[in-house]
Image (cartoon, rainbow, N blue to C red):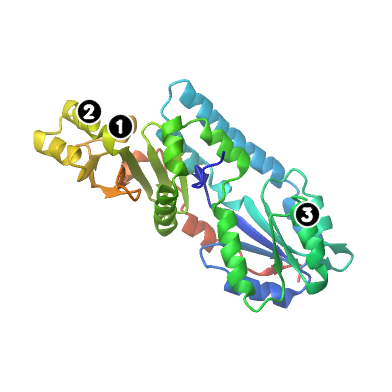
Amino acid sequence: MNPTFPLFHRSGSTVFVDDDPEYLEMLGMVMPPHWQVELYSRPGLFLERMADEPARWEADAALQLVMIDRARQGHFMAPQVLRYWADNPSRYQLIKTCVIDYAMPGINGLQVLNTLLDWPGSRVLLTGQADEQVAIDAFNRGLIDQYIPKHADDISTQLISKLHTLHQSAHARLNGQWRGTLNSGQFAWLQMPSVSDTLREHSNRHWVEHVVLADPFGLLAMDGEGRCHWLQLEPVNRLEELAELAATAGLGPSVCEQIISGRELPAIELHQQLALPGQVPMGKAFPVDREGRLLGAHFTLPASALPGPVYPYRHFLENQRQRRVQGD
């Protein structure tokens, strides 16, 4: 069973393929500015772009498997994830979603998609009225993830909504890899709709990528400016245990009382794992689920927590081609 909240999420490129350059330009203009968008008017150029994409996905998945295996051997996961973010800015270029027009000269969109057998991203077909049954059949056969009428009055709204949902859905393989790092109780929290909704809203508002960690339990995340964050998650029935841990870390009785009452949470374990200097930081607690049985606290990590400079997603967007149609 997959969690409703993705355990591993990162930004990536969305590619549009259509033989009409003006239609592509329109799509480029209406897509959200914080998305990386590529536009191709020639399927051949798009397929050249995709030639090495399965290998790049495979190499990135291998890096994640190494982190997971090292964690099973006793290495802390948080420093590994921060190192992965610092050392691999090419992850921004991975193509997450392809949106392809069905009716193109010489080749149709399904034929193009059928050449991408080993690429694990999401596939969306743009259709005309005459193509709708073809799209329905392709969807039912699992060849595409979505189909959208190309000339719908609300095409931009439909596209953004459906693409946003696809972007938020972790690829099954990656999600499966990270699922094995969580215990059953942690996984159960993420299955709760109120928890999933709260975490999704918080992540969408603050960050461009995140990883759910098991030890300690929470989200390690990065925003578009390259700043790293920690959202600690604590079940209320663990607060007394957390207060005892805080006392051993040198936090005073008044702080321990704040913890037991659920007003503040200390980032003790992350502070220790990252070998951060100074006193353990405290964060104001807020309820993550409707019943208030799971609490969260948001921390911004100091630059000293990072193993090296992180290339911000904002800089990556600024250095990309400004949504120019390729092949025009």
Identify the residue shown where x is 41% and y is 59%: 205
Residue 238, image x, y percentages: 27, 33
Asked whether, in this view, residue 218 is left or right of residue 16, the answer is left
Q: Amino acid at mark 3?
A: Leu
The answer to whether the residue labelled 2 contacts the one labelled 1, judged by CB atoms less than 8 Å apart, is: yes
State the SS at label 3: helix
User: Is the residue under label 3 in contact with that under label 1 (CB below 8 Å)?
Assistant: no
The mark that comes first in sequence, 2 or 1, is: 2
Residue 112 placed where, x, y %? 81, 56
Give the number of the mark in front: 2 or 1. 2
Left or right of 286, for residue 165: right
Report which residue position mark 3 lands on: 113
Task: Name above or below for residue 315 compared with residue 71.
Answer: below
Residue occupying the point 18% across, 25% down: 248
Q: How many residues crowd mark 3 within 10 Å: few (<14), some (14–19), many (20+)?
A: many
- Residue 242 is situated, as x and y percent measured from the top left of the image, at 24, 32
Q: Is residue 52 visible?
A: yes
Report, in whole angstroms, how far the alpha carbon at label 2 lies from the one at label 1: 9 Å
N-terminal of the two: label 1 or label 3? 3
Report whether 60 appears left or right of 215: right
Q: Amino acid at mark 1?
A: Glu
Which quadrant is the N terminus positioned in?
top right
> Could you tell me which secondary element the residue under label 1 belongs to?
helix
